[in-house]
Amino acid sequence: MIGQSQAFLEILKVIEKIVRCEAPVLIEGETGTGKELVARAVHYGSCRQKYPFVPVNCGAIPDLLIENELFGHKRGAYTDAQTDNPGLISQAQHGTLFLDEIDALTPKAQVTLLRFLQDQLYRPLGANGSQAANVRIIVASNMDLVKLAEQGIFRMDLLFRIKIMHLRLPALRERNGDAVLLADHFLETCAKRYGLGQKKLNPETLAWFSQYQWPGNIRELENMICREYLLADTALINIKSPVMDSADRRIGVDRRKASLINMKFNEAKKNVITSFEKSYLMEAMLKADGNVSKAARLVGKERRAFGKLLKKYGMDKDLITCGHPSQ
């Protein structure tokens, strides 16, 4: 966790108090503010640090499988239950269960979780009796759960159970000066991961950091730095403000439309496809952290075909080999 702003330092003070107790924790904040990072800081700073930290995205658990995912099942509990499954709660025994996007839980799933939180007893599907758990619960949401509870979308009694210790993470725009520190950290991380040498940001780039609103918060900043690090041909990186870049892109689109009309149909079509493929490949590789096989799976293409596209646009040297020599 990196920062020196007053808002960030206040969060550190609260975290220091939270790690000393065992109460459930609710972490709220906009998307990309680092909620899971804070949850890990709480876990690894507590007496449970030697035991598992199990993160769960509640939005990814189907309603019908919530009990099976949390509590597990015994062999033969249902048709496809060929072996025992311990469940997430059992995996987090003596450690921490982190439930991200808890606002995504359906009413049925909320009842299931509330029942467990009341006494930390649960029964795996197909089991004869209940089992006792010893886990700390940390939950996170990018929504205001109080408002959701007032609207009847989130159970008020569940909110009372999880909101004993509470943290609201500040948005990056509220953390004066921290964007520069984080950018330097991400540049160092990129240098280690991709092996393209040390690079730094142009002062003109740093000048707009404090004025920009960062709607995607730290995640937006990290992705921006990673992308520009990989694309930069020099050690000094100059990034246009996204606000100005957006205006430039609108002008550029108008110009491209005008220029395409001056081309023959097949030539214009080829130019558009080339531009799309290059941009699409770059985004896929960034999302896959430079791993060609993973990127191919993400976009639904065979690895060999995906690799040919990378080579077609000369992207194999910069992305395939940097930081992933085995790929």
Image: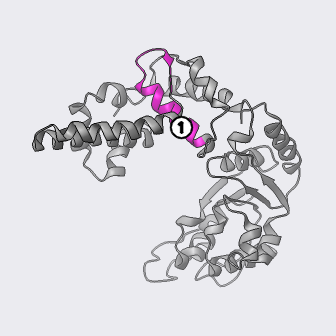
Establish if 39 lies above or below 199: below
Which residue is rendered at x = 56% and y = 66% of the image? 59
Q: Can residue 117 be seen in this view?
A: yes
Quarter occupied by residue 181: top right
Quadrant occupied by the C terminus: top left
Which residue is rendered at x = 46% and y = 38% of the image? 247
> Which is more toward the observer, 106 or 68?
106
Quarter occupied by residue 258: top left
Pointer 1: what residue?
Answer: 243
x%, y% of residue 70?
Answer: 62, 70
**In the image, is 286 to the left or to the right of 117?**
left
> Label 1 sits on what residue type?
Val
x%, y% of residue 306?
Answer: 25, 42
Quadrant occupied by the N terminus: top right
Secondary structure that dominates the magenta span: helix
Q: For the magenta stretch, what is the residue range?
A: 219-239
Q: How is the image coloured?
A: one colour
Establish if 120 lies above or below 29: below
x%, y% of residue 320?
Answer: 34, 31
Which residue is rendered at x = 59% and y = 80% of the image? 125
**In the image, is 12 to the left or to the right of 318?**
right
Crowd class of label 1 (few under 14; some 14 to 19; many from 20; radius 10 Å): few
x%, y% of residue 324?
Answer: 40, 31
Which residue is rendered at x = 62% and y = 28% of the image? 208
**In the image, is 243 to the left or to the right of 295?**
right
> Which is more toward the observer, 128 or 8?
8
Q: Can residue 304 be seen in this view?
A: no
Q: Is residue 139 magenta?
A: no
Q: What element carries label 1?
A: helix
> Which is more toward the observer, 38 or 29?
29
Quarter occupied by residue 24: bottom right
